[in-house]
Amino acid sequence: MKRPPEQPLPPYGVLIEDAREEAGLSRREAARRADISDSWWRYVAAGWQNGPLTGTADTVAAMAHAVGVAPDDLEEEGMRPDAAEALRKILARERSAEADALPGTEDETLRQIAEFTSFPLKVRRAVINLARTMEQNMNGEETA
């Protein structure tokens, strides 16, 4: 069954596809980052696969995360509040892992790290590695 031409993309599909394009990512790369196939990315973003299709909250959250969409954007009217909640859980797990990577760090520093959630994971990891190197240098330790 072909998608009716008058059937627009679902609002969350427009949001995610716009963010993907703004990030300069191909669908294939965005799908890889979301750990889904590029064909499934297309189906979920379009809301259509041989008929109407709604991706699970976890899938839409993974897609949003891959292209830097914030949870609040997924909660706007007509969007996916269930996916926003799933995205918040993804971000919380990342913040927790990042906090664990910096033992003994002050609460204020952890709050600042939490603000990095809008940055790509690669950038956040680079900042953590830099912080580790700086801490080692301050403690007079050799860096690898």
Image: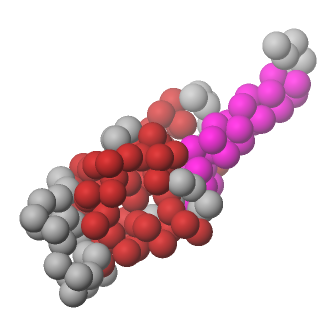
Drawn side of residue 18 relative to residue 25, left or right: left
- What residue is shown at x 26% (from left), y 58% (from top)? 44
Residue 110 counted in the magenta span: no
Q: Position of residue 41 (x, y in %)?
A: 33, 53
- What residue is shown at x 51% (from left), y 62% (from top)? 20
- What residue is shown at x 57% (from left), y 29% (from top)? 101
- Dominant secondary-structure state across the stretch colored magenta: helix
- What residue is shown at x 19% (from left), y 64% (from top)? 48
- Whether residue 107 is visible, yes or no, is no
Q: Position of residue 103 (x, y in %)?
A: 59, 28
Q: Considering only vertical position in the picture, is 18 above or below 61? A: below
**In the displayed image of the protein, which residue is found farthest to the front?**
2
Which quadrant would the N terminus be assigned to in this image?
bottom left
Q: Position of residue 128 (x, y in %)?
A: 67, 36
In the image, 51 versus 113, the foreground residue is 51
In the image, 56 versus 42, the foreground residue is 42
The quadrant in which residue 43 appears is bottom left
In the image, 117 versus 54, the foreground residue is 54
Residue 125 counted in the magenta span: yes
Drawn side of residue 110 relative to residue 9, left or right: right
Drawn side of residue 51 relative to residue 72, left or right: left
In the image, 62 versus 126, the foreground residue is 62
Q: Position of residue 102 (x, y in %)?
A: 61, 31
Which quadrant would the C terminus be assigned to in this image?
top right
In the image, the segment drawn in magenta is: 111-138
- Whether residue 130 is visible, yes or no, is yes
The quadrant in which residue 141 appears is top right
